[in-house]
Amino acid sequence: MTLLTLFSSSGLEEYMLPCYTKQYFGIDCFGCGIQRSLALILQGEFVEAFKMYPAIYTLILLFGVIGVNIFYKFNYAQRLIRDLAIISFVIIAINFIIKHVIN
């Protein structure tokens, strides 16, 4: 059994953490959807992952740059990390506003 087969099984959702904000207050938090989005990426559903959590790709890139920067220091790493963090935050905030204010 390959790792992709393991993650692509429908039983993966059984191990996801619950959102207590949604559970107690009835609204999505800023991170709601990120686990399901990662599961969709592992299943190869890239467009659906973006629809589930639009900031998923910028966050993956952000954490990838941080990981590379830990082991291999490169020029402009701090600026790139800052810019990716800002872009991710803006996408998350816009998504939150669209979900709760506009809809």
Image (cartoon, rainbow, N blue to C red):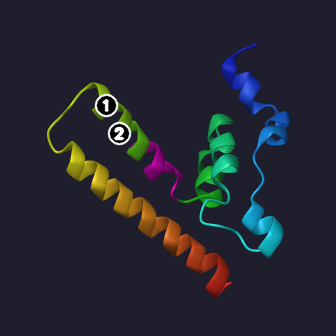
Residue situated furthest left in the rendering: 75
Q: Nearer the viewer, residue 73 or 55?
A: 73
- Counting from the top left corner in percent of width and height, residue 45 is at 65, 43
The residue beneath circle 2 is 66
Image: magenta residue range: 55-61
Magenta stretch contains residue 57: yes
Q: Nearer the viewer, residue 63 or 38?
A: 63
Q: CA distance from mark 2 to mark 1?
A: 6 Å
Q: Report the amino acid beneath label 1.
A: Ile
Q: Residue at x 59, y 65 (%)?
A: 30
Measured along the vertical axis of the image, is residue 19 above or below residue 35?
below
Q: Residue at x 16, y 45 (%)?
A: 76
- Quadrant into which the C terminus falls: bottom right
Q: Residue at x 80, y 38 (%)?
A: 15
Answer left or right for 38 relative to 88: right
Residue situated furthest top in the rendering: 1
- Please rate how many residues cluster around mark 1, counting C-alpha atoms within 10 Å: few if below 14, some from 14 to 19, many from 20: few
Name the disc covering residue 39, or none.
none
Of helix, strand and loop, which one carries label 1? helix
The residue beneath circle 1 is 70
Q: Quadrant of residue 67?
A: top left
- Quadrant into which the N terminus falls: top right
Residue situated furthest bottom in the rendering: 102
Of helix, strand and loop, which one carries label 2? helix
Measured along the vertical axis of the image, is residue 32 above or below residue 58?
below
- Please rate how many residues cluster around mark 2, counting C-alpha atoms within 10 Å: few if below 14, some from 14 to 19, many from 20: some
Q: Quadrant of residue 39?
A: top right
Q: Report the amino acid beneath label 2.
A: Ile
Secondary structure character of the magenta stretch overall: helix
Magenta stretch contains residue 36: no
Tag 2–tag 1 contact (CB < 8 Å): yes
Measured along the vertical axis of the image, is residue 30 above or below residue 80?
below
